[in-house]
Image (spheres, rainbow, N blue to C red):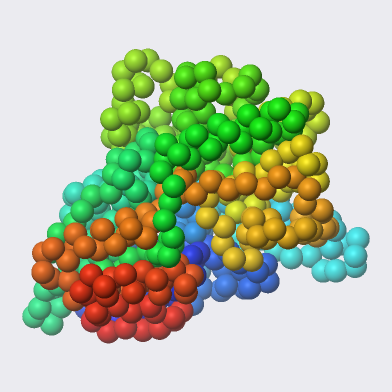
């Protein structure tokens, strides 16, 4: 078997790995790359393979950096199956359409500015119609139900504990008279996170492709994160400002809403309205309600007490553009949760445009910010940042909470690898989905556990098993 690491190699975004085995080509994930605008556009528009020659796609979860280029894949000629859990399929039905819509909307906005400057128009990476067409290929498979992917290749999904429906994929391969097991972690979650269950440990694995996002860092605990969230809201409220939270629409938004609900129940929040301003987040929250099979005991307890984990009396879900615009003219303290989490597209850009220059406000980051994204520039302390082609002074307070990360941190990743090593079969580890520093730190930690065969592949590097 040959593995070509086509994306998320020494970087976090654009997860995409090609397997060639028994004459078949299998793609693990097909994510959008995020980074510098020109590079992002070129890499996402031009797939590094011919879609007609691909036999199967296995999708770990619905986050756009793992699923977001599926419309391009289908547009390029792919007509095979896209295997995912049922929750992932449902999330993608909302997220891919929303991605196409955001790209069309942002391009229209940018092209107005380009026209005034005498520049030619640009096209979206893909459209809503492209996204809709891609949904025909999804095949839903639930956890722990083996399925045949290609001759000699059987796959099984296990709960990754990252977001709703996220999966660790184990491939049982029969090739040239030998058998072995390859594990692809996708994005590995943490123990004790709200809403969803903890990651499952798989067994008897020979090779593992592991994410390394936080391979060099440790997280705050979820309880500490909740306490810091309450503190930041109180401080911002007291100075009459707004708390602007760029948040991933899937998983992170629901976690923040759930924590705000618990803080209100315990009377730990000031009296201020909360707005979830993202049509995608609104739709995704409805999908969360459809999948109780993914819930942990805490959320099930809420439901048994007839409490809505994702709704409370101060919470408002906004859908229309008019409602969104009205938030920028809202007088007084409030909390605005809006996508995208890295501030690269969507309504969050408009909220930052209107609020980032006011020192009363707080921009609160609750997720990882990839290098060269707008979110990373703000978090790194740049005094001026580009939004829709203009530069805006950053006078708002900038804060970050790491405890909300849905990614396993260094210790949690190493603990997971250690459990895989307990079966005495693990032969090699591939460290992906992390910047070089994180991959190197994780690799050093794995070697310290006694596993010397660790590779940090470069983009388009080919490895033969």
On the picture, is 78 further left or further right than 294? right
Q: Is residue 330 visible?
A: yes
Q: Residue at x 18, y 49 (%)?
A: 145
Q: Is residue 272 above or below residue 254?
A: above
Q: Is residue 21 above or below residue 187?
A: below
The quadrant holding residue 247 is top right
Residue 104 position within the rendered picture, expressed as x and y whole percent measured from the top left: 68, 53
Q: How many numbered marks have been drawn onto this rendered protein structure?
A: 0
Please name whichever residue, 107 or 401, is drawn nearer the observer in this view of the structure.
401
Please name whichever residue, 35 or 331, is drawn nearer the observer in this view of the structure.
331
Residue 361 position within the rendered picture, expressed as x and y whole percent measured from the top left: 73, 38
View extreme (left): residue:
177
Q: Residue at x 54, y 66 (%)?
A: 33
Please name whichever residue, 76 or 179, is drawn nearer the observer in this view of the structure.
179
Q: Residue at x 39, y 79 (%)?
A: 457
Residue 243 position within the rendered picture, expressed as x and y whole percent measured from the top left: 67, 36
Q: Is residue 202 above or below residue 273?
A: below
Please state, as top left, top right, bottom left or bottom right, where the N terminus lies in the image.
bottom left
On the picture, is 173 further left or further right than 84? left
Please state, as top left, top right, bottom left or bottom right, where the C terminus lies in the image.
bottom left
The quadrant holding residue 37 is bottom right
Q: Residue at x 38, y 36 (%)?
A: 194
Q: Is residue 103 visible?
A: no
On the picture, is 230 further left or further right than 1? right
Residue 313 position within the rendered picture, expressed as x and y whole percent measured from the top left: 56, 17
């Amino acid at each position: 078997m040959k593995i070509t690491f086509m994306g998320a190699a020494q970087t976090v975004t654009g997860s995409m790995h090609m397997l060639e085995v028994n004459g078949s080509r299998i793609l693990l994930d097909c994510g959008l790359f995020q980074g510098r605008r020109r590079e992002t556009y070129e890499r996402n528009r031009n797939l590094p393979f011919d879609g007609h020659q691909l036999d199967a796609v296995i999708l770990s979860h619905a986050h756009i950096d793992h699923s977001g280029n599926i419309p391009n894949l289908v547009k390029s000629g792919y007509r095979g199956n896209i295997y995912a859990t049922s929750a992932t399929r449902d999330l993608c039905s909302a997220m891919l359409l929303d991605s196409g819509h955001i790209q069309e909307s942002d391009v229209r906005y940018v092209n107005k500015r380009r026209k005034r400057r005498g520049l030619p128009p640009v096209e979206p990476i893909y459209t809503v119609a492209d996204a809709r067409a891609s949904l025909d290929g999804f095949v839903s498979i639930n956890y722990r139900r083996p399925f045949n992917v290609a001759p000699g290749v059987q796959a099984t999904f296990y709960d990754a504990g990252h977001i709703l429906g996220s999966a660790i994929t184990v491939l049982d391969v029969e090739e040239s008279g030998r058998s072995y097991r390859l594990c692809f972690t996708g994005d590995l979650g943490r123990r004790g996170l709200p809403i969803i269950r903890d990651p499952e440990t798989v067994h008897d694995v020979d090779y593992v492709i592991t994410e390394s996002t936080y391979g060099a860092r440790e997280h705050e605990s979820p309880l500490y994160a909740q306490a810091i969230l309450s503190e930041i809201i109180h401080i911002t409220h007291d100075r009459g400002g707004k708390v602007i939270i760029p948040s991933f629409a899937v998983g992170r938004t629901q976690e923040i809403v759930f924590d705000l609900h618990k803080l209100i129940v315990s009377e730990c929040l000031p009296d201020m309205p909360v707005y979830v301003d993202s049509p995608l987040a609104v739709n995704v929250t409805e999908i969360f309600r459809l999948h109780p099979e993914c819930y942990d005991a805490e959320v099930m307890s809420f439901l048994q007490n007839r409490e809505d984990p994702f709704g409370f009396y101060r919470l408002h879900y906004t859908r229309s553009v008019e409602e969104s615009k009205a938030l920028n003219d809202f007088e007084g303290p409030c909390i605005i949760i809006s996508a995208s989490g890295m501030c690269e597209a969507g309504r969050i850009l408009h909220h930052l445009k209107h609020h980032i220059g006011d020192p009363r406000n707080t921009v609160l980051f609750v997720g990882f910010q990839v290098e060269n994204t707008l979110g990373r520039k703000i978090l790194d302390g740049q005094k001026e940042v580009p939004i829709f082609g203009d530069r805006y002074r950053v006078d708002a307070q900038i804060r970050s909470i790491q405890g909300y990360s849905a990614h396993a941190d260094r210790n949690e990743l190493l603990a997971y690898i250690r459990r895989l090593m307990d079966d005495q079969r693990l032969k090699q580890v591939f460290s992906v989905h992390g910047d070089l520093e994180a991959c190197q730190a994780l690799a050093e930690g794995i070697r310290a556990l006694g596993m010397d065969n660790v590779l940090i592949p470069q983009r388009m590097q080919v490895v033969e098993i």
